[in-house]
Image: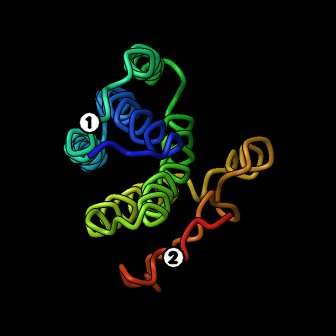
Amino acid sequence: MKLNHPQLVDLLQMAYSAEKAAAFAYQGHAGSVKNKEEKAAIRQIEIDEWNHRKEVLEIMHRYEVPVSRYYEFRFHVIGKTISTACYVIGWFMPFYFAGRLESGNVCEYFRMMHFFHELGIKDHDQILYEMGIKEKEHEVYFLEKIKNSKLLPFFEKIFGWGGKNSFNDVDLDAKYSIEASEDYCKK
């Protein structure tokens, strides 16, 4: 079955490739930190991103959605660039921008769910919900690492994410059920 939903097809293709960029970035981020617990946590997040990429590809295969060469190239370069930059930009920025990125990624998976629902498809609700929640857990982890930095208010003012601002409306302490999660990310 082919998907007759250009926005959903594009979002699947972009998410698939962007997960590779994130995984590459986390390779550099994990390599650049000295703290063993942080290194292990960031490596686990990298593994989560590779798993998300695998799950998205399985969905793409089901609907004959091809991998985008353009997105693959673009996000490969972005991921490798960020990975290298982690060794030279200090400790704060890798944590900050990882949290900001993860904050936006949360809604990718809930938007996919919305688009599938527009087509009357609910087969992927469980996995899309789990990936969206996992991205939120990543966001919370990175924010926790920088929440006391004096740089956070400045970066939040410039880049719109931080202690007071998120790019999603998911609250891990009051999660919606899978059935009610369609209410997430409606903006």
Q: In this figure, what is the number of numbered marks?
A: 2
**Residue 108 visible, this orientation:** yes
Please state which of residues 106 and 27 is positioned toward the viewer in this rendering: 106
Q: How is the image coloured?
A: rainbow
Identify the amino acid type marked 1. Glu
Please state which of residues 92 and 120 is positioned toward the viewer in this rendering: 120
Q: Which of marks 2 and 1 is nearer the N terminus?
A: 1
How far apart marks 2 and 1 lie (CA) works out to 34 Å
Q: In this view, does 81 lie above or below 98?
A: above
For the C terminus, which image quadrant? bottom right
- Give the x, y percent position of residue 37: 25, 50
In the image, taking residue 119 as reference, residue 150 lies left or right, namely: right
Residue at point 73% right, 42% down? 159
**Residue 81 visible, this orientation:** no
Q: In this view, does 25 lie above or below 120?
A: above
Identify the amino acid type marked 2. Asp
Please state which of residues 21 and 68 is positioned toward the viewer in this rendering: 68
- Mark 2, Cα crowd under 10 Å, few <14 / some 14-19 / many 20+, is few
Of circles 2 and 1, the one toward us is: 1
In the image, taking residue 147 as reference, residue 121 lies left or right, namely: left
For disc 1, the marked residue is 64
Which of the labelled discs sits on residue 171, or is there none? 2
Residue at point 38% right, 45% down? 3
- Give the x, y percent position of residue 116: 41, 59
Please state which of residues 35 and 12 is positioned toward the viewer in this rendering: 12
- Give the x, y percent position of residue 90: 52, 28
In the image, taking residue 94 as reference, residue 54 lies left or right, namely: left
